[in-house]
Each structure stands twice: as C-alpha cells, then as structure tokens.
Amino acid sequence: MSYVIIEKCLGERYAVCATVCPVECIHPGDYKGQEFMIIDPEVCINCGLCLPECPVGAIVASEDEDQPYAQINKELTPSFKGNPPAPERPKNDPPKRPGNKLVN
C-alpha cells in the first residue's frame, strides 16, 4: 500500500513532500479546480519521508485510512505526471485552505 494525499491538500500549492521523495512519485495538479498534490501508488516505495514534511498533515500512511482519496490519487496520477514541480513554501506563509493549520 502506498501513502495517500487527502482532502486537506485541496487548495494548498506548496509541496515540500515532493522535494524529499526519493522516487519522485508526488505530482502537483488540481482537483475540482483547486491545487492538489497526488502520490502515484505504482511508484511509491512507502519510505515515509513525505509524511513528516507535509505542513498541513495531508498525507496518511495507508490507503485504508481514506479510500476515496486513495482512489482519487490513483485516477489522477496519469494526468499529473510531467507537471512542473510545485513551488516551495516561503517561511511563515499560512495554509491556503480554510481550517488548515500548520502541523510542523
């Protein structure tokens, strides 16, 4: 099972998670018109490096923790591959999604 990016990522545009991924399986794009990152479940090696890097806690360690978003990650992977990398989050930049709080 691969890691999964969940709803908390909707509207967020920065991707520290992607910069630490050793297999480059995290891709930026959009979902329902909002910026969103996905993890390619076919490439993810379950190393866990992305998990502590997400500033809003939008990554879960198992597809079982959020089946709908596991399916969304899987379905969107082909359309997100090849997108340019997401920008890095400037220091002190707040989360973009209402209700999200920085967790690290």
Image (cartoon, helix red, strand yellow):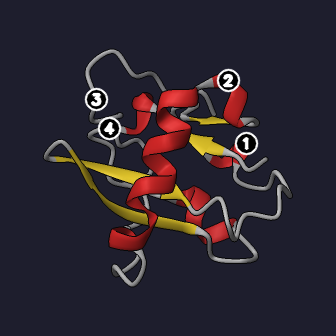
Q: Quadrant of the C terminus?
A: top right
Indicate the position of residue 55 as horizontal and vertical percent values.
Answer: 55, 39
Mark 3 — residue? 97
Mark 1 — residue? 52
Q: Are marks 4 and 3 in contact (CB under 8 Å)?
A: yes
Is residue 90 visible in the rendered structure shown here? no
Indicate the position of residue 32 as horizontal and vertical percent values.
Answer: 18, 42
**Alpha carbon of mark 1 to alpha carbon of mark 4: how far?**
18 Å
What is the secondary structure assignment of the residue under circle 2?
Answer: helix
Q: Which of pointers 1 and 4 indicates the residue nearer the eye? A: 4
What residue type is disc 2 on?
A: Glu
* Of residues 25 and 95, the one drawn nearer to the viewer in this rendering: 25
Q: Which of pointers 4 and 3 indicates the residue nearer the eye? A: 4
What residue type is disc 3 on?
A: Arg
**Around disc 1, counting alpha carbons within 10 Å, would you say few (fewer than 14), some (14 to 19), or many (20 or more)?**
some
Mark 2 — residue? 65
* Of residues 98 and 29, the one drawn nearer to the viewer in this rendering: 29
What residue type is disc 4 on?
A: Leu
Indicate the position of residue 47 as horizontal and vertical percent values.
Answer: 86, 58
**Alpha carbon of mark 4 to alpha carbon of mark 3: how far?**
7 Å
Q: Residue furthest top?
A: 99
Q: Quadrant of residue 93?
A: top left
What residue type is disc 1 on?
A: Pro
